[in-house]
């Protein structure tokens, strides 16, 4: 009897010991009674060749670190993103979190589909105020989490500058200097070299590309600001004459998307480019013979040249993350979004390898590899502080079409610039009245 009781005590002790070991073993998997939350993530980078595997890796790591959260990644082409998100939202079946660009965030927010992120976003993710405001400020609240920068900077080809008799260590800081350098380069460089990468296409991206130049001539006064329209101003007239001259003199190629200039850049046939930080990786993909050393020796980066008021501008075009009001898993969605944007693993495996610089204030300290590239350092220190918002809102797409149609008319006809801008002014006043 005593032996039987002793055996029972031993069995209980062993069971308790096993329980303690199991409890102390760490969160390798959810407990049987814990709830596993599924966060639906609609995005386009999971489908694109350059980012697909990187995003899959980051999602897998997030799920490993957060075993009670599963990510259901659904891919939608970037060109169809807003259409699909609008259909899902109006149909009462939105995702928890989605990838959008600036105009998408404001459009969805103005439709009442998004949750403000001011209280959801962890305070550990500190983003410069100009970025936060430019990327999703609507009626006093922020609706977008900045994920990866997509702004344009001035990329200058140091080898071509030297060939043109220009100082390769002194890129143009003002529009006046840019014009002077382009004029000198046109006289000395081969005819197949394109001086300026300017996108004048009738697209929102065309306006994104041209917005900084417009502001340079208007001294920072937006031609569209809220419901105020001033595209026939003296400054916009000067801009119109300038963009017409760039095409007339052969300094740029009319009607080309800015991505079409990248092949020329990879072939050393572009003097001044206006492109994002990821151009580094694009150049290597277009010309596999290029090494990082080759790119650093050939290209420099700085802010887009300033206008008469001395200020530098670059338009917001960031990749953003938004959380939907109808989501039942807002906290989990916010945790995932912050992980994508600011976690050290994501910064290392996605931002760094895909060619994006970080937004987080301490990101470069946690991932010092960002500082190894002089191009990245220039983006972080010179370009991001110059980010300003585009005229986002429900009318943005239509306004872009009207304004860029005017630009196309300026560069493809001999009609007086004031006449073209007055016509655009009237059309814009109609949609903003």
Image: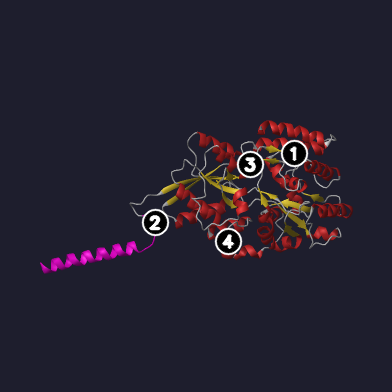
Q: Secondary structure at mark 4?
A: helix
Q: Secondary structure at mark 2?
A: loop
- Judging depth in this view, the residue of 289 and 130 nearest the camera is 130
Point out which mark residue 231 bears: 1
Q: Earlier in the sequence, mark 4 or mark 3?
A: 4
Residue 295 falls within the magenta-colored stretch: no
Q: Nearer the viewer's eye, disc 4 or disc 2?
A: 4
Q: Quadrant of the N terminus?
A: bottom left
Q: Which residues are magenta?
A: 1-30
Q: Could you tell me residue 156's position as x and y percent?
A: 77, 56
Q: Could you tell me residue 189's position as x and y percent?
A: 86, 54
Label 4, on which residue? 363
Q: CA distance from mark 1 to mark 4?
A: 39 Å
| Dot 3 crowding, Cα within 10 Å, few <14, some 14–19, many 20+ | many
| Dots 1, 2 in contact, CB < 8 A | no
| Dot 1 crowding, Cα within 10 Å, few <14, some 14–19, many 20+ | many
Q: CA distance from mark 4 to mark 2?
A: 29 Å
| Dot 4 crowding, Cα within 10 Å, few <14, some 14–19, many 20+ | some
Label 2, on which residue? 29
| Dots 3, 1 in contact, CB < 8 A | no
Q: CA distance from mark 3 to mark 2?
A: 43 Å
Q: CA distance from mark 3 to mark 1?
A: 16 Å
Point out which mark residue 392 bears: 3
Q: Could you tell me residue 375's position as x and y percent?
A: 69, 60
């Amino acid at each position: 009897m005593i032996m039987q009781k002793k055996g029972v005590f031993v069995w209980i002790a062993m069971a308790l010991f096993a329980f303690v070991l199991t409890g102390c073993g760490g969160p390798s998997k959810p407990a049987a009674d814990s709830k596993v939350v599924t966060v639906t993530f609609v995005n386009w980078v999971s489908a694109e060749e350059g980012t697909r595997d990187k995003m899959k890796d980051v999602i897998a790591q997030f799920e490993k670190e957060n075993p009670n959260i599963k990510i259901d990644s659904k891919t939608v082409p970037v060109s169809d993103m807003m259409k699909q998100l609008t259909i899902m939202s109006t149909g009462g079946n939105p995702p928890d979190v989605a990838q959008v660009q600036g105009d998408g965030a404001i459009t969805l927010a103005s439709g009442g589909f998004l949750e403000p992120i001011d209280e959801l976003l962890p305070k550990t993710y500190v983003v410069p105020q100009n970025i936060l405001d430019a990327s999703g400020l609507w009626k006093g609240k922020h609706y977008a989490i900045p994920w990866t920068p997509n702004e344009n900077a001035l990329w200058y080809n140091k080898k071509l500058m030297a060939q043109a008799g220009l100082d390769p260590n002194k890129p143009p800081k003002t529009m006046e200097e840019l014009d002077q350098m382009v004029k000198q380069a046109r006289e000395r460089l081969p005819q197949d070299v394109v001086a300026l990468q300017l996108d004048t296409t009738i697209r929102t991206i065309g306006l994104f590309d041209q917005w900084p130049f417009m502001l340079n001539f208007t001294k920072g006064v937006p031609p569209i600001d809220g419901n105020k329209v001033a595209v026939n101003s003296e400054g916009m007239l000067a801009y119109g004459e300038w963009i017409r001259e760039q095409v007339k003199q052969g300094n740029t190629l009319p009607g080309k998307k800015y991505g079409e200039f990248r092949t020329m850049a990879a072939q050393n046939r572009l003097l001044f480019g206006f492109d994002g930080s990821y151009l580094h990786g694009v150049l290597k993909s277009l010309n596999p013979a290029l090494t990082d050393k080759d790119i650093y020796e050939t290209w420099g980066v700085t802010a887009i040249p300033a206008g008469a008021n001395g200020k530098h501008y670059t338009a917001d075009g960031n990749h953003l993350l938004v959380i939907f009001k109808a989501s039942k898993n807002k906290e989990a969605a916010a945790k995932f979004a912050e992980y994508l944007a600011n976690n050290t693993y994501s910064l290392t495996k996605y931002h760094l390898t895909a060619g994006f610089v970080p937004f987080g204030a301490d990101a470069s300290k946690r991932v010092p590899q960002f500082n190894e590239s002089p191009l990245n350092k220039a983006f972080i220190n010179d370009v991001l502080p110059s980010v300003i918002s585009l005229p986002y809102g429900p009318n943005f797409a239509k306004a872009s079409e009207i304004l860029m149609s005017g630009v196309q008319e300026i560069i493809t006809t001999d009609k007086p610039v004031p006449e073209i801008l007055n016509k655009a002014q009237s059309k814009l006043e109609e949609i903003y009245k």
